[in-house]
Image: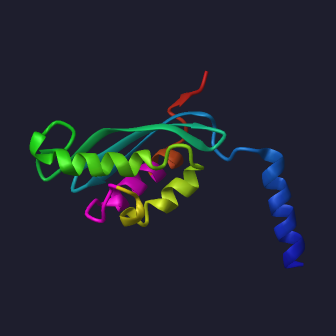
Amino acid sequence: MKKVLLLLTLVSGLAYGAEYRDGTYRGVYVSGQETQVEVQFNLKNDKVTSAKYRTLYYKGKNYLKDKDMEMYKNQYEVALKSTINQEVEEGIESLYHPEKIEKAGATIRSTKVRAAIQNALNSGVYKLAK
């Protein structure tokens, strides 16, 4: 019985195609009433085609603009860009191990990035693809 249910689940997943609508997604990670991470990414057939940070902020430091935070900004950008050309769920999963992403390092808070991506998916498409 379990095998039949699993097979039906797999077949129905194939019949419907992509899980998420094609388009632009935006999501945030907020802590202490402060938006720390805001991401924007595009999906096509559930694959990330582009990704960027709209906000990257922590304890009064704007990682996107503060020259002293350049190293951290680069690590965060490498981590987010590693999701490009991956199924979005695989990209999220890869962020559980940022130390395995070349040049990302273990010092980034990938939990915040994952949460922002998941928030975007939960919120739905921001702008439909043309």
* x and y percentages locating residue 18 in the rendered image: 70, 44
Near-viewer residue (53 or 36): 53
Indicate the quadrant containing the C terminus: top left, top right, bottom left or bottom right: top right
Indicate whether 52 appears above or below 128: below
The answer to which image quadrant residue 49 occupies is top right
Near-viewer residue (90 or 13): 90
> Magenta part of the protein: which range?
103-118
Would you say 2 lies left or right of 71 here?
A: right
Residue in the image at 43% along x and 60% along y: 95
Is residue 108 within the magenta segment?
Answer: yes
Near-viewer residue (50 or 125): 50
Task: Note whether residue 90 is visible.
Answer: yes
Near-viewer residue (69 or 5): 69
Q: Residue furthest toward the bottom?
A: 1
Is residue 109 within the magenta segment?
Answer: yes
Indicate the quadrant containing the N terminus: top left, top right, bottom left or bottom right: bottom right
Would you say 77 lies left or right of 22 here?
A: left
Task: Note whether residue 36 is visible.
Answer: no
Residue in the image at 18% along x and 44% along y: 70
* x and y percentages locating residue 8 in the rendered image: 87, 63
Residue in the image at 48% along x and 60% along y: 94
Number of numbered labels in the structure image: 0
Residue in the image at 56% along x and 57% along y: 90
Q: Residue furthest toward the front?
A: 102
* x and y percentages locating residue 2 in the rendered image: 84, 77
* x and y percentages locating residue 85 in the rendered image: 56, 43
Q: How is the image coloured?
A: rainbow
